[in-house]
Image (spheres, rainbow, N blue to C red):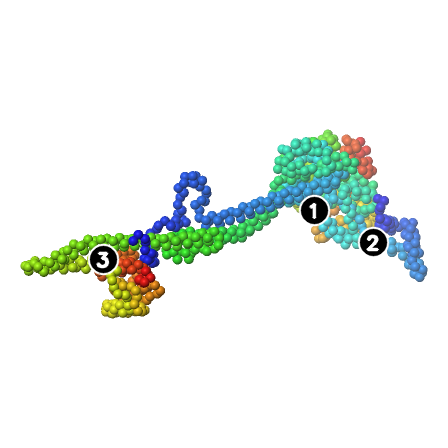
Amino acid sequence: MGAPDPGVALLPDPPRGADGVGSTTPGRQAPARDPDFTRLRLPFRDLSYRYKIPLSVSFVILVTAVVISTALALQAYRDARRDLVVRAESMGKTLAHALGPIMLRDELWLAYEMIVTPLAGGSAQDSRGKVTVVLNSENQIYVSTQPTLFPTLQPLAAAGAGYATLAARLARDSSAGPTVLEEVVPGHLVVSVPILSDDSTLLGRVLVLYSESLFLQRIEATLLQVLVSTLAVLAVLLPIGWFAGNRIVEPLVRLVAVFGKAGREPSPRVAQDLYTGGDEIGQLGRQFQAMLRELEHKQALERQMIAASRLTSIGRLTAGIAHEINNPLGGMLNAINTCKRHGNADPVTARTVSLVERGLLQIRETIAALLVEAKVTSRALTHDDMEDVHTLVVPEATKKHLVVRWNNDIEGSVPLPSTPLRQVLINLLLNSVQAAADSGYVSCSLRTEGELLLIDVSNDGTALSPAQLEHLFEPFGSEAGTGLGLWIVYQISQQLRGEIRVTNGPPLTRFALRIPLEAAA
Amino acid sequence: MIAVPRRPRRASFLGWAMVSGAGAATCNARSATWARSLAAPLSACVAVLVLGLWAPMPRAGESDASRPIRFGTTAVILEDQVAILHSWKGYLEERIGRPVRFVHRGSYQEISELLSKDQLDFAWVCGYPYVRNRTFMRLLAIPLYEGRPLYQSYLIVPKSDTTTHSFRDLKGKIFAYSDPNSNSGFLVPQYELVRLGENPASFFQKSFFTWAHSKVVTAVAAGLANGGAVDGYVWETLQRTHPELTAQTRVVRKSALYGFPPLVARASLGEKEFRAMQDVLLGMSQNAQGRQLLARLNLDGFAPDDPHVFDGIAEILAFIQTRQPGLVGAGGGTSASRALRSEAN
């Protein structure tokens, strides 16, 4: 028999060893073997997606928040600066207008009082970062809000680093309006407004100097507000981002877990954990499931093929040995027969010959049992044939206090040889009686369905062990009985081109035979 | 000067007429009343006529009693002391029985001018303008500071300046005066410099007026001026009320004692009114309310007029005018100063 017999299906699967499918677990990914790959190894490459995706989402949120906050802060800084320049210009213009007549009359004190009034921005809040300096027409300091730093009548150029440049720039400046000078005095923004007399003679200048620290001080509150808002937004968005990231990655994590479980747990249980969404991961899950089923089917098929080919080999071997034994055996039995009939043997010899004859007969029986011959001419199977088997088995069952549920639906004669089928049924029933639990039950159902004879024998005994299943139909495979019962069932079934399906309990261990009727064959 | 309100002027004139009892003035007043009476409706003609016959005397008296007493002050001595002035005003009104109006001006010059034009009845001026304007200023009372009608001029420098020990060290620096008509805040430093043989006009690189003693302290404290001349009484009072301000200054030198800025009346003021005010002022130290006010002013009381208190000021003025004529303004050119000048000559 070259082709595998699809009739043998052993269900459910015996557990298999790890065979490579889905054996990787998320925790220990196989390190990259490719040296190029190793060189290109990215940071966090080995980190689980469970963290990678939420981290990425969080990172994007963080970057966005930082960018927006920075933009807002910069805007606030620019606004504050512009506001300051505008205010300085307007204040400078007001002061320049009022200082004209005062400078003409050389009222130094009035000029000082004017520039230090809160109206001129001389309040304590601003005084730290702001200095107002009034210059005379020779660029000497006429008066300032900080006389110790800018003493009266000192040339502006002597006031410190950058002031010489400032003085030079101012000497060249002939505009009648405000001038904004940045980056001239280090760390300061300077707004200069000329003081003009009624006939537009330059009397001096009002300089408003703002230190850079004043900007920061001014926008401190704004920056703090931006920071607080950013943190508040982050406090809301980061958990949401983390949650969303987890939601995205969760099916993948489940898929990986399923991959890991595949092959170690029964596939239906594995499959129930699978995510079945319509996205890529869902598709992957479904494909994996299909693959798993296919693989399982293939493996079942392989196992059946192995079992069938082994049984075939055993059958061929048995037949060969039986044939080789039967020829000399027949000769020996003939010789003994001749010897007994014609020779006058002494009692010892006669006893020995008789012993040899009994031994040889036993060998012939065993060989005959091994060499199952189903194709012997036999009458067609009838309802009563099977009833006979029932009658034969009941005493055995009664010994174990078993209930036999007998259901013989065969009507008339069935075109199949009665003798081998009686043999099959008696073997199956005796097997079942033996396997059934004490006070348990055995059930047998017989019927024809279309072109098939269906024999169904089951019992409530303990399930077959994996070792038993592996050698189930092999001669002397079982420890009980002659060890040839199921071998005979298998051989006959094979010869009648039938198939056997074994369902291993609990609760029932069931043998189901389907044998095509001869008319159909 | 031209825009002087008509009514107060007439009222003051009437007041003076009352005291002096000049008949012409009375006739004037009566004719004015007649003119008003004639303008009245005809129906009330007789009544008005009767009233008009006896009305002038009581009306004039009533007008005099209700006319506010105008009291001139400057920022030079008292600045930002509205609350004290308000209490003092109440005190004076209660005792004199007439409304008192404080007229505040920015400089001694303005107050002097108002006095000379009879637009003020009394004023708190400095000894220097008093000495120069005795023709129209009559000494009313001299405040007693630390028990004496005397005070000093302080030379102050910023606290950070530890090297200045006299006027000489301030040569070529920036200097703050209070008022060109102030004794302690101008005349005394001028005198000190002249005495040192310096020309005050060119001794400093620059000098300026703050028009108030307390602002001299502010200017020096801020470093706007390298030195300043300040009324010692004002500096000491500030040290009590604003110690953080005076702490930023250092007193380098205290001058000799001079007559404390006096309270004066216009020379044309009636004797009765003059005495009434003088009595109230001199009596201030006699009652609790008055003492409380004096304490707030950091004064001990008022002394009666004693012109010799200001001899010292007259002397230094004469000294300056002798050494450096034209340095101090011609001012009033009072007879006293002229006399002193000729005496010094």
Q: Residue at x 83, y 43 (%)?
A: B116
Mark 1 lies on a secondary structure that is loop
Q: Residue at x 76, y 49 (%)?
A: B281
| Disc 2 target residue | B65
In the rendered structure, find residue B148 and report the number of the disc placed on it. Answer: none
Q: Residue at x 76, y 41 (%)?
A: B127
Give the amino acid at mark 1.
Asn
Instruction: Point out the image quarter for the N terminus of chain B.
Output: top right
Task: Confirm whether circles 2 and 3 share one chain.
Answer: no
Specify whether B147 is left or right of B116. Answer: left
Task: Confirm whether circles 3 and 1 share one chain.
Answer: no
| Disc 3 target residue | A371
The answer to which of B28 and A218 lies nearer the viewer is A218
Q: In this rendering, does residue B135 appear at all?
A: yes
Mark 2 lies on a secondary structure that is helix
- What's the CA distance linking mark 1 and mark 2? 31 Å
| Vertical relation: B89 (above or below) B307 | below
Task: Say which chain tag 2 marks.
Answer: B
Q: Nearer the viewer, mark 3 or mark 1?
A: 3
Task: Say which chain tag 3 marks.
Answer: A
Q: Residues within 10 Å of mark 1 (few under 14, many from 20)?
A: many
Locate residue A512, reporting x and y percent. 32, 62
Task: Say which chain tag 1 marks.
Answer: B
Give the amino acid at mark 3.
Leu
| Disc 1 target residue | B298
| Vertical relation: A353 (above or below) B231 | below
Give the amino acid at mark 2.
Ala
